[in-house]
Amino acid sequence: MASRGTGFLSALGFAIVGVAAAWLWLVIRPNEHSTDTASPASLAAPPAIVAPRETAPAEPSAPATTDAPRTARAPSLPTHPVGWEDSLRASTDYFALAQRAALSALAGDSRAQYVLGQVLSECRDQLRPVASMQSGSAAGNVRAYLALIPDAENRALVARRIGRCEKFFDGSPLDGLDVPEGAHDSRYWLDQAIASRDPLAVMDHALEESASRHWDSVPPEHRAHLLDDVRIAVTSREPAALFKISTVYSLATVARDPAQGAVWLVAACEAGYDCSNANPDIGQGCIERRGCDARSTLPEAMRLALGDTQFAEIRTTAQEILARINRGDWEGLQPYLEMR
């Protein structure tokens, strides 16, 4: 691959991992009860959490039209039921959402466990620095904290994120429920989701484990565990889980080839994952800050950077991956999952 392509794919890999790592820092932090206080500047443009809609997801949409050479598109993967994530993206009241999710999480719903863990973590991190203002009331603390953010658009963005968590000032959404010890901590529910083999939780954990290592080649024991995790994601046929595979294979310590993360990313986009800036996980709040075009997509940026020919090669490989997933051909996916 040309040097321009290699350089862009490496940069893209860093960007993908950066998005995922920022989210992991919010959601899967080792010290649940840290008393460190984040500054307003550090929260002015925090990583966006999983995106919004209370309604059932639409059928996977076709990729944006480009002038790149075309190949036959692999059949669309079936839509995975992701109602809890849609609720998370759409909700303006995380307290009420957490109350609903808790009932399903206690009944063993792994996606509800995952989303509950995300909500508890997000609201903990949004409200901790606000509470430190000590103005005498929750409303006063919010006003004092927001006054420290000079940029009006960032201030409005933070105000919305604090607003959806504001009921947490008055208590826990788990109050009154018969919950196990430790269940008020986000880590408890994320661990439950991992144990229940939720594909998104499993892949978040895989990224956390892989990103924290500094090896020249992936040890056999980690390779086996990572492939087990990837198989859970692949078997789910969930576009968001495929996107999370791309984050792992964008790590230089995992991928054998810089193109692997890009190929899995395009596969996720083709399968129906929203790879535009309209998805807060991709845009990271840039639309709310008026810093980007909502219609811009990662595959389109890739095509413009690499050129039609190189992008067509990546897209063709992504379609081959989707075809193998549709056939349930795990062995046929192994060439795309090689590690360094």
Image (tube, grey):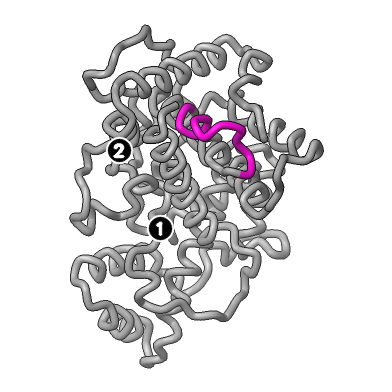
Residue positioned 45% across, 32% down in the render:
262
Q: Position of residue 215 (x, y in %)?
A: 71, 48
Q: Is residue 219 above or below residue 60?
A: below
**Does residue 219 belong to the magenta stretch?**
no
> Which residue in the protein does label 2 denote?
276
Instruction: Compare residues 221 and 139 and report the one nearer the observer.
Output: 221
Q: Going 41% across and 34% down the picture, which residue do you hit?
A: 3
Please state which of residues 83 and 39 is positioned toward the viewer in this rendering.
39
Relative image position of residue 149 (x, y in whole percent):
27, 77
Across and down, in percent, residue 330 comes to 65, 17
Q: Is residue 29 left or right of residue 137?
A: right
Marked residue nearer the N-terminal end (2 or 1): 1
Q: Is residue 159 visible?
A: yes
- Read off the magenta span: 253-263
What is the number of callouts on the image? 2
Which amino acid type is shown beneath numbered disc 1? Pro
Which residue appears at 49% of the width and 47% of the height? 17
In the image, residue 150 sits, relative to residue 22, either above or below, namely below
Is residue 327 shown left or right of residue 243?
Answer: right
Q: Secondary structure at mark 2?
A: loop
Along the viewing direction, whichever of 249 and 225 lies nearer the viewer:
249
Question: Quarter of the image containing the C terminus?
Answer: top right
The amino acid type found where label 2 is placed reads Ser
Between 234 and 306, the one lying in front of the other is 306
> Residue furthest toward the front?
3
- Whether the residues at callouts 2 and 1 have beta carbons within 8 Å, the answer is no
Q: Is residue 255 magenta?
A: yes
Kindly indicate the quadrant of the structure image that contains residue 146.
bottom left
Residue matched to label 1: 47
Residue 241: in sight, yes or no? Answer: no
Residue 327 to residue 272: above or below: above
